[in-house]
């Protein structure tokens, strides 16, 4: 039987653990929707807060959904269209929504980048790549050099990963010192080269990434945006399940992007 935890207690833990107040972000980090339901027995976890994901969370009787990509970006939008439908669903079904964007990219242990580095067996994992003073990625050292093809093969096994990963093989083909910035971070190619790293791993590239990588002799692996950002929320799922004893639900909906 799962335990029951008060919504404010769990939110307070997440806010402190992820240090959300220290980040300057286009997204609102923290509790985005507070439903009337205060006692939590089941917490859902997902990458995105799409309508289909919210509906599935309600179907599984979740009282809280924790996501990487929430519904509040930039300025406050009118509550119409899809946003209105999402809010109506949450309030009617008693589902609160918590989102952690950049804080869950750069967290030293639970972050997308740090968790991805651990998946590759890396050591000496350190916060890296900063945005407005806060880390949004990681740098790590593999225990032994790996070929670019071996790394892409391993990454292709991740949930929702591009098969094969999109690879820009313009730098070293054998790598050991890697930079990781999940999501859409191909703009960090110049910094990857400046810091003397062998490889940048990210999610999806911008068009200009091809020539940036080629001009600077940098190798880049793009495993897919969704695939690169399942790690942080899954780490939170494990932590919250162990710390609070609540039932957890992983809601998988790969986007293919």
Image (tube, rainbow, N blue to C red):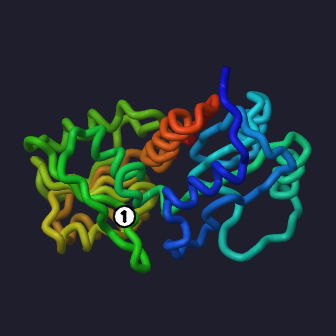
Which one is in front, 243 or 18? 243
Asked if residue 18 lies left or right of residue 198, the reply is right
Looking at the picture, tell me which residue is in the foreground, 146 or 38: 38
Q: How crowded is mark 1: few (under 14 residues within 10 Å), some or many (20 or more)?
A: many
Q: Where is residue 121 in the image (x, y as percent from the top left)?
A: 22, 39
Quadrant containing the N terminus in the rendered view: top right
Q: Is residue 141 above or below residue 44?
A: below
Q: Is 217 situated above or below 17?
A: below
Residue at 43% x, 64% y: name it.
206
Percent of width and height locating residue 119: 30, 38
Residue at 74 percent across and 28 percent down: it is 60
213 or 45, which is in the foreground? 45
Q: Give the residue pinned by disc 1.
A: 186
Q: What element carries label 1?
A: helix
Q: Residue furthest top?
A: 1
Name the foreground residue: 252 vs 22. Answer: 22
Compared with 177, 93 (above or below) is: above
Position of 100 with respect to 164 (left or right) is: right
In the picture, residue 150 is in which quadrant? top left
Give the image location of residue 55, x and y in percent: 78, 37
Q: Does any portion of residue 205 appear in the rendered image?
A: no
Residue at 47% from the left image edge and 50% from the top image edge: 225
Q: Residue 58 sits in which quadrant? A: top right
Q: In this view, does 67 lie above or below 193?
A: above
At a point 40% along the width and 55% down the height, the residue shown is: 182
Judged left or right of residue 224, residue 70 is right
State which quadrant residue 73 falls in.
bottom right
Query: Seen in the image, is 34 located left or right of residue 69?
Result: right
Q: Provide residue 37's location: percent of width, then percent of height.
A: 83, 44
């Amino acid at each position: 039987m799962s335990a029951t935890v008060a919504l404010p207690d769990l939110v307070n833990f997440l806010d402190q653990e992820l240090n959300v107040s220290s980040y300057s972000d286009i997204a609102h980090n923290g509790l985005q929707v507070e439903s009337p339901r205060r006692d939590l027995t089941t917490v859902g976890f997902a990458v995105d807060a799409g309508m289909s994901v919210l509906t599935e969370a309600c179907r599984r009787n979740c009282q809280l959904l924790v996501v990487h990509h929430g519904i509040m970006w930039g300025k406050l939008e009118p509550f119409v269209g899809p946003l209105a439908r999402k809010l109506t669903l949450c309030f009617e079904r008693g589902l609160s929504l918590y989102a952690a964007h950049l804080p869950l990219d750069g967290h030293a242990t639970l972050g997308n980048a740090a968790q991805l580095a651990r998946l590759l067996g890396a050591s000496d994992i350190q916060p890296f790549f900063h945005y407005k003073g806060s880390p949004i990625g990681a740098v790590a050292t593999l225990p032994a050099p790996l070929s670019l093809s071996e790394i892409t093969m391993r990454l292709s096994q991740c949930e929702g990963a591009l098969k094969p990963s999109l690879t820009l093989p313009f730098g070293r083909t054998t790598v050991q010192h890697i930079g990781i910035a999940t999501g859409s971070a191909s703009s960090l190619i110049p910094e990857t080269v400046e810091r003397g790293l062998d490889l940048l791993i990210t999610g999806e590239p911008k068009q200009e990434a091809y020539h940036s990588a080629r001009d600077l002799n940098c190798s880049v692996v793009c495993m897919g945006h969704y695939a690169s950002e399942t790690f942080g929320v899954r780490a939170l799922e494990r932590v919250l399940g162990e710390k609070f004893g609540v039932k957890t639900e992983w809601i998988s909906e790969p986007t293919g992007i």
